[in-house]
């Protein structure tokens, strides 16, 4: 970042160097991403801790939904803090966000479990996630705008790419702290200790990071562009109506959402989060292995955010972002098929050699997920599909005779299931356990592995697939901050930019793991969930090509 500071042609306010501005902004954003990613990386454990009253599938998806719920509130935070940032200043808005985010994260590490407090535990967890999402909604726009309004026009892409890189630093730090805690706690207290209480340590670790972030941001002064506008009395008196009530500005908001942020949410969260869900839930890769793989991929991504941000300063924002989203569009399905072949080749071989078919009366089959835990999957069809979904086994669906019990056909082997309808809870559980045992026994006999075999993993091939995803995600994400800042006028920049960004990353990206897993559980094909991010990415490829203007070199004083 030293060379970034050397290229500036504008003196930041009150003597702050561009290097200090970038470092303080990126450090605070890194901390907030760390907070958010710790939760996403511990989804499996959180589902067991706070949703133990649900069955395995419903509990896991409830935790994924809660991960997405934090993102759902980001647009609200974007509107609230966007107005503050456009009316009162950039610095104050994104200083408050880091305090809110840090306090909520530390609190999660102190919450009681479902076993200790019942329904109060998940209710408090939901509240903390809402606060996290609300705070992060105001964070990104403030940091990106603050850096861009300090940077020279010919280095905005490179300068703001450090804010983008903060996502990689935050994810890497989250994975590193989780892995270190898992190893240390496991060695000292046994492998079960991390799941019991050790998972709280990464959340509590945020207290120290929060202190550092606040200290660095208190050293900053207001951005030059905003200070100049304020001195001239140019602030917007009604940022909402000006940003969304005037067609010339609303059109830019819609273009930003459709042409950039739809793909950003889909691509980035598939590459860095749904990949983890896929490896864990479907391919049965050990959590420690997933952490190592994602740490390597994330470390590599940190470099490419800056590379593609720099490249966008040379050839333009649009071609670089278009390359990233198009690459991911092409890589979705073949890439995830390659993950199966490289991470769990025994599973790929078993699926090719011995396909699984569920024959059942359609009237007996429900969707295989329940985020609120009110449905009861006790029909023979539901029990069979629940077992297969949790085993990560793809299956085809065939209609059965009306009123008949479901059958699971594994090659030439037929497993008859049973219904638990109307049975007492204990008896219903016994029926489900027996069916699960029969199906898993038949799957094992057909060569379906219970876990991925580390000895058969093709680690170079696995990393190769992840690197393709990384290149696509960083090419798209690296120039985004500069592009969005340049797209909107200074008077409404914080408000207008933040809303489409957080709708894309929050409502589209944040729900990628939840929605994709839900589609898989319902349809039966472990790759079917990819149609969700594929559709949003395709939308952006078309709209970016046709409607997004090139913004490189635009003045930020307009």
Image (tube, grey):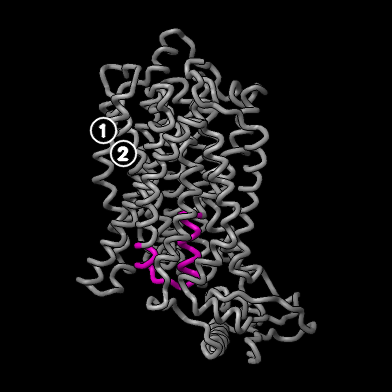
Examine the rendered structure and indicate whether residue 125 appears above or below residue 7: below
Q: Residue at x 57, y 73 (%)?
A: 389
Q: In the rendered structure, which disc, 2 or 1, sits on the residue that comes first in sequence?
A: 2
Is residue 420 among the parts visible in the rendering? yes
Task: Find the distance from the CA under tag 2 to the CA under tag 1.
Answer: 8 Å
Is 373 placed left or right of 195 in the picture?
right
Q: Residue at x 67, y 41 (%)?
A: 542
- Of the 4 image quadrants, the one containing the N terminus is top left
Q: Nearer the viewer, residue 370 or 502?
A: 502
Q: Nearer the viewer, residue 555 or 431?
A: 555
Is residue 81 among the parts visible in the rendering? no
Which SS type dominates the magenta stretch? helix
* Other-residue count near label 2 (Cα within 10 Å), few / some / many at <14 / 14–19 / ≥20: many
Residue at the front extreme of this rendering: 315
Q: Secondary structure at mark 1?
A: helix
* Other-residue count near label 1 (Cα within 10 Å), few / some / many at <14 / 14–19 / ≥20: some
Q: Which residue is mark 2?
A: 27
Examine the rendered structure and indicate whether residue 201 appears above or below residue 326: below
Q: Residue at x 56, y 83 (%)?
A: 432
Q: Which disc is residue 268 wearing?
A: none
Is 10 placed left or right of 429 in the picture?
left
Q: Which residue is mark 1?
A: 216
Residue at the left extreme of this rendering: 188
Image: magenta residue range:
271-292
Q: Where does residue 316 sit, x and y in percent of width and height? A: 52, 31
Q: Where does residue 488 sit, x and y in percent of width and height? A: 54, 24
Is 295 placed left or right of 262 in the picture?
left
Q: Where does residue 204 sit, x and y in percent of width and height? A: 28, 53
User: Is residue 288 part of the magenta span, yes or no?
Assistant: yes
- Number of labelled discs? 2
Q: Tags 2 and 1 in contact by the CB under 8 Å rule? A: yes
């Amino acid at each position: 970042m030293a060379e970034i500071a050397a290229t500036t042609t504008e003196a930041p306010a009150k003597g702050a160097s561009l290097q200090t501005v970038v470092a303080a902004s990126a450090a605070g954003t890194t901390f907030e991403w760390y907070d958010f990613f710790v939760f996403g990386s511990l989804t499996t454990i959180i589902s067991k801790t706070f949703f133990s009253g649900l069955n395995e599938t419903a509990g896991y998806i409830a935790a994924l939904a809660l991960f997405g719920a934090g993102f759902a509130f980001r647009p609200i935070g974007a509107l609230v803090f966007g107005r503050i940032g456009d009316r009162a200043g950039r610095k104050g808005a994104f200083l408050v966000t880091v305090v809110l985010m840090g306090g909520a994260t530390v609190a999660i590490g102190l919450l009681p479990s479902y076993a200790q407090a019942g329904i109060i535990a998940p209710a408090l967890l939901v509240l903390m996630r809402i606060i996290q999402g609300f705070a992060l909604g105001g964070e990104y726009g403030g940091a990106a705008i603050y850096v861009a309004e300090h940077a020279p026009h010919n280095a905005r892409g490179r300068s703001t790419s450090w804010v983008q890189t903060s996502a990689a630093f935050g994810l890497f730090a989250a994975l590193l702290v989780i892995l270190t805690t898992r190893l240390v706690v496991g060695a000292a207290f046994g492998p079960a200790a991390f799941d019991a209480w050790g998972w709280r340590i990464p959340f509590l670790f945020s207290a120290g990071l929060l202190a550092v972030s606040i200290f660095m941001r208190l050293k900053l002064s207001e951005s030059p562009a905003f200070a100049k506008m304020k001195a001239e009395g140019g602030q917007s008196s009604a940022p909402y109506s000006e940003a969304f009530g005037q067609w010339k500005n609303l059109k830019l908001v819609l273009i930003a959402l459709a042409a950039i942020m739809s793909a950003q949410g889909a691509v980035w969260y598939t590459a860095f989060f749904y990949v983890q869900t896929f490896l864990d839930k479907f391919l049965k890769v050990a959590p420690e292995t997933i952490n190592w793989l994602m740490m390597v991929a994330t470390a590599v991504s940190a470099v490419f955010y800056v590379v593609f941000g720099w490249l966008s300063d040379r050839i333009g924002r649009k071609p670089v972002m278009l390359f990233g989203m198009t690459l991911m569009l092409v890589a979705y399905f073949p890439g995830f098929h390659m993950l199966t072949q490289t991470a769990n080749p025994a599973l790929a071989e078993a699926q090719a050699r011995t396909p699984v078919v569920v024959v059942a009366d359609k009237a007996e089959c429900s969707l295989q997920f329940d985020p609120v835990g009110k449905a009861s999957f006790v029909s023979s069809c539901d029990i069979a599909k629940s077992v297969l979904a949790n085993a990560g086994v793809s299956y085809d669906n065939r209609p059965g005779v009306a009123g008949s019990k479901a059958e699971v056909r594994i090659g030439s082997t037929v497993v008859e299931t049973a219904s638990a309808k109307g049975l007492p809870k204990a008896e219903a559980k016994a029926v489900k356990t027996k069916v699960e045992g029969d199906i898993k026994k038949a799957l094992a006999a057909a060569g379906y592995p219970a876990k991925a075999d580390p000895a058969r993993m093709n680690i170079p091939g696995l990393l190769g697939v992840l690197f393709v995803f990384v290149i696509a995600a960083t090419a798209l994400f690296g120039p985004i901050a500069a592009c969005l800042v340049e797209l909107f006028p200074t008077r409404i920049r914080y408000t207008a930019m933040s809303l489409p960004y957080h709708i894309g990353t929050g409502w589209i990206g944040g729900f990628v793991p939840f929605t994709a897993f839900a589609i898989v559980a319902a349809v039966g094909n472990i790759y079917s969930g990819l149609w969700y991010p594929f559709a949003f990415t395709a939308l952006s490829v078309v709209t970016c090509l046709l409607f997004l203007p090139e913004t490189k070199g635009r003045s930020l004083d307009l």
